[in-house]
Amino acid sequence: MASAEDLNSFRDEARQWLTDNFPSSLANKRPPGIAGFGAKLSGDWKSWQESLGEKGWSTPTWPAEYGGGGLSPEQAAVLSEEMREMGAISPIGGFGTMMWGPTLLDFGTEEQKKRYLPDIIRGNIHWCQGYSEPGAGSDLANLQSFAEDKGDHFILNGSKVWTSGALEADWMYGVFRTDKSNKYEGISFLTLDMTSPGVEVKPIVLISGQSPFNEVFFTDVVVPKENLIGEKNLGWNIGKRLLLHERQSIAGSSEGGVVGGSYGIEQVARDYLGMEGDKLADGAMRERIAEQKMFAHAYALTGRRFSDEAAVSGPSAAVGILKVAWAKDNQNREELLIEMLGNRGLGWEGEGFSDNELQAVRTWLRSKANSIEGGTTEINLNLVAKRVLGLKGY
Amino acid sequence: MAVLTEEQSMLKDQANAWARDESPVTKFRQLRDSGAARRYDDATWQEISAMGWPGILIPEAFGGSDMDYATFGVVLEETGRQLVASPLLASGLVGASALLLGGSDAQKQHWLPRIAAGSAIVTLAVDEGPHHGPEQLALAATASGEGFKLDGSKVFVLEGGSADAFVVAARTDGAPGEQSGISLFLVPADASGLSVSALKTADSRGYADLTFAGVEVGADSVIGEVGNGFPLLDALLDRARAGLAAEMLGTACEAFDRTLEYLKTREQFGQVIGSFQSLGHRAATLFMDMEFARSCVEAALRAIDTDDPETPILCSLAKCKAGEFLHDMSNDMIQMHGGIGMTDEFDAGFYLKRARATEATFGGQSFHRRRYISHYGL
């Protein structure tokens, strides 16, 4: 653990670097998109992406030898405080930084780490995740997309579904069947170039009218052997570890519940429900808003506590409850917002509604996926029952 | 659990072992069955005092050990697990906090060493109706000679039957509902005109109603500032709420542990009942509520210790979240145990009764939701 003196000198260093490299025009602004998740940035955002990626501070705790920041957890916390202080938001993210990179650090060969990590750190490559299939949702290990071993390469046939961002993605990592006779020990973890011949992507239109998810079809796609992560037929454990990183990263994002979007719950309450003196006019809604805000607050405190504890003792299966809570928090908040908006929360498009009102409708509908994607609420409760509480039969 | 200091970790182990071995729930059951008027055991209180717990917050100069609220919370959580009945919270935390926050030098000199040693019980008398509402108090303090004369009543005073002195919130001015005009007084239990009547309650803990009929107190009995006592009272109540929330968390965690153990051992249809998803998912959801409550309780205690401006918000959050979890857990403890959960012979009933009593003390969930949302201007 670093001494207070070392941390103070790092704080000075971080502040100086941010002053020199963070364009002040971007202070307190959200990036127009995420580099590493579909966005091609330009102007000041582009130069901020480049200097942050070059320094490795988009992934502060990843080893410096692969282009990461090489910082200790304490230093990373200081960096994050300094960035918040300056209103500097990283425009680099996506599945690469959230879960694929950490998994690669655990399981990749030296050559694979050097091949993939630098572009993840700089936000140059948009990765998508090939997991779910039509017959493999909660029972993910039932996946059937088959990668036939042809010596120096695999030939891949089959399909994936609910693949976020696949339409814009450059590369995919995922789990594929390499042995049809063994459910769990017949799965391999592969990467593939989305521009390979035989890869076809079809967007899925959701109830929100938007298409964040896709179907991906593979027809005789050639996947070189060097794209195999870990051992053939032993990819299930790698796939599961990646999901643990996914839930841990949700723990780190739990602040969102308190900060709220640009269209916060308090402002909507004042504008659409009206006040009586210093209180909301609708007493029943007032109590429900309080409950929602307190749940979000407790969730944020728990995310922070789990992160602190993980820094000392590693990630725990208990983070599964944060995925459940994240979905519940989002869904309750969006439901409440729509209810507060009344008939202003029923617009679909056109002139009769404000942009915020229209966005609230789409966000509300999108949030219904939160308890399904990344492991359903029911599957997460199973995992907590089994791994944390030690109950049998899950 | 937050990463504990070495001192907290030692105290936690000590409190856990002592409560489990020396003051388990069976002891509380004996006390209830005995029908003793004093709702705690003198020998138990002497052991607690000998370990120095009533003096955790009190400076060494006054015979305490000068530790913080987070450390007190660790101990209260462990005593809460075994439903230990004692004036530790009422006097060691609430009574001591009143003096530490607003006591004069003379008041501190006189009372703090006694509180630390466990030889005097000082408790807070605030509420006057069926619901917690510090602004609503009406007990009148009128100027009389050099001091004041108190008339009115207080209800449900924690450990009121065994107290040596009361911190009494009274009105020197203003009307019920107003924050201004409130003053705090330190009133000895044997003051002339003060009558104390002990209550027999469902949870078998010690409470009393107080009647003040022309109780004369000197100007030196005022704690803090005359007429402007509300901020002090509010800060005191927040300490009481956070401390009680820690105790409630411990009570609920023990109810959770015992219920989980039952899910792993009770068999029906040839399998342990915890293998049924309807129970496993409920247990996992209760686990989430438990972790959330812990985060809030720890954050509130830390906020008090660091003088965080968010202390009132966090204390309301902690009391509410601990209350919600304890409420649901105490109900599910009975339901998941089935018929045996309903019997007096089994302990679940004690947890349920303690739950409702602590939920109502210093403001229930509804009170704290309203207080919380007020802080956001709604």
Image: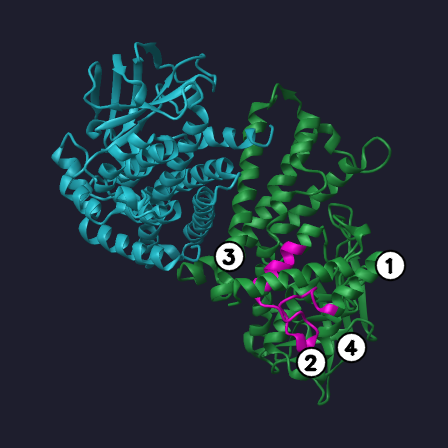
Chain colours: A green, B cyan
Q: Which residues are magenta?
A: A55-82
Residue B130 in picture, x, y percent from top left: 36, 21
Q: Mark 1 or mark 3, which is nearer the start of the sequence?
A: 1
Label 3 chain ID: A
Q: Residue at x 40, y 62 (%)?
A: A392
Label 2 chain ID: A
Label 3 or label 4, whichever lies nearer to me, is: 3
Q: Is residue B339 visible?
A: no
Callout 2 secondary element: helix
Which residue does the numbered mark 3 point to in the structure image? A306
Q: CA distance from mark 1 to mark 4?
A: 34 Å
Q: Residue at x 63, y 51 (%)?
A: A370
Residue B42: mark? none
Q: How many marks?
A: 4
Residue B109 in picture, x, y percent from top left: 27, 35
Residue B93 in picture, x, y percent from top left: 32, 38
In the displayed structure, A273 sits above or below B309; it is: above
Mark 4 touches mark 2? (CB < 8 Å): no
Give the residue type at disc 2.
Answer: Gln
In this rendering, do the residues under marks 1 and 4 share a single chain?
A: yes
Q: CA distance from mark 1 to mark 2?
A: 29 Å
Q: CA distance from mark 3 to mark 1?
A: 36 Å
